[in-house]
Image (cartoon, rainbow, N blue to C red):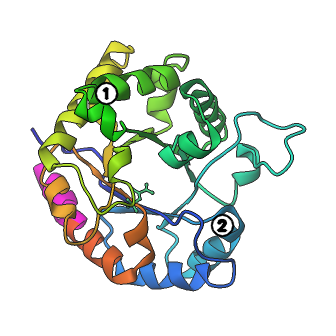
Amino acid sequence: MIHAMRDVIVAANWKMHTTPVDAGELALTIASRTREPSVIRVICPPYVALAAVRDALAASDPDVGIGAQNVHHEAAGAYTGEISAAMLVGLAGWVIVGHSERRRDFGESDDRIGQKLGRATDAGLRAILCVGERAEERDAGEAEAVVGGQLRGALAAHDPALLAAAGLVIAYEPVWAIGTGRTALGSDAALMADAIRGTLVQLGWGSAAEDVPVLYGGSVTAANIAEFLAEPTIDGALVGGASLKPDEMAGMVARASLTARARLGAA
Ligand code: PEP
């Protein structure tokens, strides 16, 4: 069943690409090629380019959401080189938490990711929580259990009503699909979206679980996004590599607008 009210979102994770000098112009180009009011667009540049992207978009396309790629789990303190949620206010309205590259490279645990989620939502940032299994876990038939464990670890300590009100988004990103050119099957991603909402119900979310947007991420491009958006339980994409290319973003958002308009029409 199509859930008429769920947002359709295309979020760009620029990772460690662009500089403050070129990020604003790239954001402007992407914004001008993706003007589709039915789709929520979010651009997540590196921290140091947040201000440049904000300033570039402020006059021409303030509807584009701006996100950080990470946030610290404490509110303030002796954490050299780190960025708190409060520091992001005014620069970003969104934040990615628990990306698999941070789990892998910085040992971020589910518990730590849950703390970040709390800091983000307390500061009024809309969080995109990333979850996803590794290849060996999928091969062992453990994908749903792994993702369920990640969700329980990050969410159990939080009041579902608060996270729901803060507009939590969940991105299902199988680790083996990120940056590899391999994608999940749309049908597998859809099954995982069901499992994710099932876990939210177990965590006490009740009917609010159905309102949580679930994105697919992992080698999404303009050529393959349709496979995911054809699934009624999938609400958009979190995109890495292809999100740096205006042509790709234009194609992905154009396809997303078909889904978004169909949902609005069904509302
Ligand atoms: C990501 O960084 O979240 C991602 C999905 O990357 P890519 O699209 O490059 O696989």
Amino acid type of disc 1?
Ala
The reply to whether the residue tagged 2 has its Cβ within 8 angstroms of ligand 1 is: no
x then y, percent, for residue 195: 24, 27
Q: Judge whether 4 appears above or below 109 on screen.
A: below
Say which of 87 and 20 sits in front: 20
Residue denoted by label 2: 50
Q: For residue 145, which quarter of the picture?
A: top left
Q: For residue 140, which quarter of the picture?
A: top left
- Quadrant including the N terminus: top left
Instruction: Give the structural element (helix, strand or loop) at label 2.
Output: helix
Ligand 1 is found in which quarter of the picture?
bottom left
Q: For residue 181, which quarter of the picture?
A: bottom left
Is 259 contained in the magenta span? yes
Q: Earlier in the sequence, mark 2 or mark 1?
A: 2
Is residue 219 left or right of 126 when viewed as pictured? left
The residue that appears at 24% across and 73% down in the rendered structure is 254
Q: Looking at this view, name the residue that lies furthest to the right.
A: 78
The residue that appears at 59% across and 24% down in the rendered structure is 111
Residue 267 appears in the picture as rendered: no
Residue 151 appears in the picture as rendered: yes
The residue that appears at 61% across and 74% down in the rendered structure is 53
The residue that appears at 12% across and 54% down in the rendered structure is 230
Category of crowding for the residue at label 1, using alpha-carbon neighbours closer than 10 angstroms: few (below 14), some (14–19), many (at least 20)? many
Residue denoted by label 1: 209
x then y, percent, for residue 122: 65, 34
Look at the image and give the residue range highlighted in magenta: 256-267
Amino acid type of disc 2?
Leu
**How far apart in space, not on screen, are marks 2 and 1 (Cα)?**
31 Å
Q: Judge whether 245 appears above or below 5 on screen.
A: below
Is residue 161 left or right of 48 when viewed as pictured? left
